[in-house]
Image (cartoon, rainbow, N blue to C red):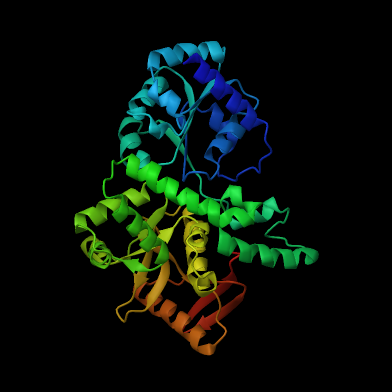
Amino acid sequence: MKDILINQRKERDELLGRPYLERRTEYDKEQLLQSPLVKFISGPRRVGKSTYALLMLKGKNFAYLNFDDQLLLSRWNEDLVMRLLDDVYPDYQFLMLDEVQNLPEWDLWVSKLYRRGKNLVITGSNANMLSSEMMTVLTGRYLLVEMLPFSLEETFAWHNIDIQHVKAEQQTEAIALADDYLRNGGYPETISARNITQNYMSTLFDSILLKDIAKRHKVRKTTELYNLASFLLANFCNPVSANGLTTDLQLSSVNTTKKFCQYLCEPFLFFFLPRFNNKLKLMQKADQKVYVVDNGFVQSAGFNLSENLGRLLENQVFVELLRRGYKSGQTLFYYRSKNDKETDFVTRKGTKVEQLIQVCYGMPSEKTRKREMDSLVECAKELQCNNLLIVTKDEENIVEKNGHTIRIVPIAKF
């Protein structure tokens, strides 16, 4: 066991020696570390959670345990590990637990460490950690830092461009970067090596299905799981229902479909957006729209991206709204009017509708412009909301429509 911990220390030191782009979060790292609460960094695999934690702790005396290591898990002995940590990391002040959800009953152990006064920084790639396990055992004892793939702003920063103040000589590069991000997404490993995007994202997709879902939940019908995941990826931004999916894919049962959909949400791979309705029962009955955590996964499936630019932009806006703290089904919805006119996103603050957002790649024709604006205005009247926005590829304007003011902004400014 000591050899395992020593090897993990070498791994930690090697990772600390690499150059990284600093991720942007709402928290100050020093203030986080000063808090005795558990620092929980949550998000999909490979988006930089471990890197963020390591950079937070860089220069500090901290111990490191990586639970993506099968050797550590297979030989796990809590008391022995805690004794050996004192030998491998003398007088350590912080303890970093990487991908801790892989450890059985991790939440009870983390709670015990917290009660013993350990200053903990942990990472996890499973949304269920928040909804059930962690909420019950560690309620009020942790600070949450949520991470997603690089935003468009962070991608620009990687290329030394300030997205809010693009210089004249950078305009061409900025346009190319925005288009590249739309098509290939923001996974850190692919930002500087776009030629590997399709292969990398395809491998990551399979790994999440196999490791984070099939293995964790002991799924026997792996073919059904893969078929469902592939179908959802092909139909991103479209409305789906458990009954429809079961029929279309000839799955075992509606219950199996619902269970698999829940599994696919746990590793932050897919998200389901409900239709807004003040009556909960009606909201639960309506179709939900499906989104994927990064456009790079669409690229990995080999779809014709040129035919999906509108949906890619809509998916990008959805993920950006998540990045800003909106929660699907709590503060974020889509809406369909009584006349079947749709608005892509409804944001809510408290009990009030805050904003309606329509996404349209471009409005080159008067017919398209009229359709998008008419839908937005009709939904605005029903929801009694005057904060209306259309996000496009590159248009910027302010339009008056039937007594409503509509702001049109390019994705880079959004």
Q: Quadrant of the C terminus?
A: bottom right
| For residue 33, side relative to residue 352 (left or right) | right
Q: Residue at x 55, y 87 (%)?
A: 365
Q: Position of residue 225 (x, y in %)?
A: 32, 53
Q: In the rendered image of this protein, does residue 334 appear above or below residue 196?
A: below
Examine the rendering and report whether any part of residue 389 can be seen: no
Residue that sits furthest to the bottom in the current view = 366
Splitting the image into 4 quarters, where does residue 113 fall? top left
Q: Residue at x 49, y 88 (%)?
A: 367
| For residue 249, side relative to residue 123 (left or right) | left
Examine the rendering and report whether any part of residue 365 can be seen: yes
Q: Residue at x 45, y 84 (%)?
A: 371
Q: Position of residue 354 (x, y in %)?
A: 43, 63
Splitting the image into 4 quarters, where does residue 168 fall? bottom right
Q: Position of residue 124 (x, y in %)?
A: 44, 37
| For residue 287, side relative to residue 18 (left or right) | left
Residue that sits furthest to the right in the current view = 169
